[in-house]
Image (cartoon, grey):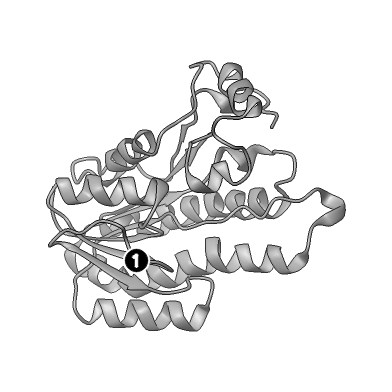
Amino acid sequence: MSGTALVTGGSAGIGKAICLHLLERGYEVLNLSRRESDYEHPKLRDVAVDLADDGACKAAIATLTSEFEITNLVHNAGVIRPALLEDVDLADVEYLSRLHLHAGILLLQGILPAMKKAAFGRVVIIGSRAMLGLQTRTAYAATKAAQIGMVRTWALELGPFGITVNAVAPGPVVTDMFTDVVPADSDKAAQLAASLPVRRLGHADDIARATMFFLEPDNGFVTGQTLFACGGASLGSLAL
């Protein structure tokens, strides 16, 4: 495995794990994130950008595509902004739409010419088990569910060009974003782990390994799919 991969939100959590797995496999990795990575590698390049800003996103991808032939995209960046229905702020819905949906569209539009030229491309969207429904997740679940609609549509459109598009939907994974809502050592975290069929919370590497499956050049016969890497949480209800 080799080539150039663009990863969003690769400075921490799941995104960082994905970047490290890619670097280990010899990829040139471009990390688009609001903050720099806390690790260094000769094949890692950090690009500071607010992906919820359409103009900044377009400018960043224009710069990168002038320097790199990018044939792998992992759109991982995301935020939750939880709220009960009564408290949902439409500004949060708009922000998550720009981050989860607009950014994915703009980035793929930017690198699509290189993929079509190479007759090869791998696109992975990091969704969420929450798209099936979860209390306090109106904005998050809605935009994550919308990502799956885009994945299936893009898979249909891009398959003839050798480009596959898939999604990984994590369940409860211990990252900074998760612990902002559920503290790692709390009773709630322990109860959540006990409720899963595998009896543990996920780790960022669990999601990175699933992502690498879809990025594998030889896995060109799998497209338009969503892999729930969730410890079995998608098999029933999940209560936080």
Q: Tell which of 184 and 62 is nearer to you.
A: 184
Image coordinates of residue 130 in percent, x first then y, are 62, 40
Question: What secondary structure is marked by label 1?
Answer: loop
Position above or below: 158 against 191:
below
Image coordinates of residue 108 in percent, x first then y, are 38, 67
Position above or below: 73 against 64:
above
**Residue 66 visible in image:** yes
Label 1 crowd bin: few (<14), some (14–19), many (20+), radius 10 Å: some
Rendered-image quadrant of the C terminus: top right
Instruction: Name the residue located 63 percent from the left edge and 68 percent from the top edge.
Output: 95
Image coordinates of residue 93 in percent, x first then y, are 69, 63
Instruction: Name the residue located 53 percent from the left edge and 71 percent from the top edge.
Output: 52
Instruction: Name the residue located 52 percent from the left edge and 56 percent from the top edge.
Output: 78
Check disc 1 and report the residue beneath it: 36
Q: Tell which of 122 and 222 is nearer to you.
A: 122
Q: Tell which of 227 and 153 is nearer to you.
A: 227
